[in-house]
Image (cartoon, rainbow, N blue to C red):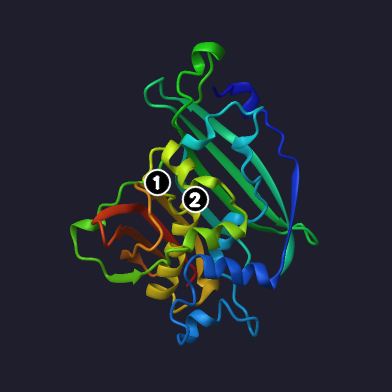
């Protein structure tokens, strides 16, 4: 079971992450860019000549990997679910660079033995050469098998803040974008650094309660970035300054996501996404903030 003091005091250290042009292209392929190999806008993110970086790649830089699997953490790691992701981009990412990730657990909330626990984490990503802050990534994760830890420690933080509910859905969306995923999407995406077997091993997926491996939450987050870039940014990555979303249901590889976007201003949009094949909402409360 989770231990409050162990998790809150966990020392991740400074994580140095060097990535190459190949890594940048592989990330874009993992979230579906290049599905239409004749689409010149998509090819800008998967060809080395004039390569552009998908801004959501910040979410996979400088992270601690599958640290939940460390036995010292004491968490039932196959039952950990990614619930929310929020990334702010302060400076554009280069196609190849070395960055430093500074990670910390900001909150650990006990919801009780039946409801599990909630963990909030934050990561600052800086350029290793200049120290410039490139991005800040925040995530909320549900520890489904670790509720009740406060009965031992007597300590529990307040529930971390969730993204605001969308009210714009009362009207028709301003933009709709449909994007497919490949049957092998999770197997490609995991090569960007998330080797959690939940997304590749059918036996691990079954233990977690899924009929087959699910797509990484951050893969669907990247697909959301693609939808925003395509739908309202004209594929200009420098315009996307923040992307945040709540994960409401798993996405399975080979499913298609239909995104609906509502423009609140020329610098802010809200969005959600549905799986076309099952009619299930898988992403909601989405926020995209844009530069002029």
Taking the spot 57% from the left edge, 77% from the top edge, the residue there is 46
When the figure is inspected, residue 60 is found, relative to residue 229, above or below; the finding is above
Locate residue 171, reporting x and y percent: 19, 62
The circle drawn on residue 199 is 2
When the figure is inspected, residue 60 is found, relative to residue 13, above or below; the finding is below
- For label 1, the residue is 163
- Whether residue 70 can be seen here: yes
Name the side, left or right, on which 266 lies relative to 64.
Answer: left
Inter-mark Cα distance, 2 to 1:
26 Å
Locate residue 110, reporting x and y percent: 46, 23
Q: Nearer the viewer, mark 2 or mark 1?
A: 2
The crowd level at tag 2 (other Cα within 10 Å; few <14, some 14-19, many 20+) is many
Name the side, left or right, on which 283 lies relative to 82.
Answer: left
Taking the spot 53% from the left edge, 54% from the top edge, the residue there is 87
Q: Secondary structure at mark 1?
A: loop
Taking the spot 33% from the left edge, 71% from the top edge, the residue there is 177
Name the side, left or right, on which 122 lies relative to 37.
Answer: right
Quarter-of-image position of residue 90 = bottom right
Q: Residue furthest front?
A: 203
Q: Quadrant of the N terminus?
A: top right
- Whether residue 94 can be seen here: no
Q: Secondary structure at mark 2?
A: helix
Question: Which comes before the other along the chain, label 2 or label 1?
Answer: 1
């Amino acid at each position: 079971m989770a231990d409050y003091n162990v998790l809150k005091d966990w020392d991740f250290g400074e994580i140095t992450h060097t990535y190459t042009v190949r890594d940048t292209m592989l990330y874009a392929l993992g979230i579906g860019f290049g599905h239409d190999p004749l689409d010149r806008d998509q090819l800008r993110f998967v060809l080395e000549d004039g390569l552009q970086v998908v801004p959501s790649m910040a979410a996979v830089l400088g992270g601690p990997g599958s640290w939940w699997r460390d036995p010292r953490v004491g968490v039932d790691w196959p039952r950990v679910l990614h619930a929310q992701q929020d990334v702010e981009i302060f400076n554009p990412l280069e196609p190849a660079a070395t960055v430093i990730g500074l990670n910390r657990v900001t909150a650990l909330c006990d919801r009780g033995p039946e409801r599990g626990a909630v963990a909030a984490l934050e990561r600052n990503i800086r350029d290793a050469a200049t120290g410039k802050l490139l991005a800040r990534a925040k995530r909320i994760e549900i520890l489904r098998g670790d509720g009740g830890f406060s009965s031992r420690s007597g300590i529990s933080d307040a529930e971390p803040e969730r993204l605001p509910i969308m009210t714009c859905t009362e009207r028709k969306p301003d933009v709709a974008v449909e994007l497919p995923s490949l049957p092998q999407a999770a197997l490609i995406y995991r090569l960007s650094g998330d080797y959690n077997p939940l997304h590749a091993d059918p036996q691990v997926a079954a233990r977690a309660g899924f009929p087959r491996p699910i797509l990484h939450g951050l893969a669907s987050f990247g697909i959301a970035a693609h939808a925003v870039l395509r739908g309202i940014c004209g594929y200009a990555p420098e315009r996307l300054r923040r992307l945040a979303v709540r994960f409401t249901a798993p996405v399975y590889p080979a499913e298609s996501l239909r995104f609906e976007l509502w423009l609140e201003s020329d610098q802010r949009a809200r969005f959600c996404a549905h799986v076309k094949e099952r009619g299930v909402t898988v992403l909601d409360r989405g926020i995209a903030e844009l530069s002029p």
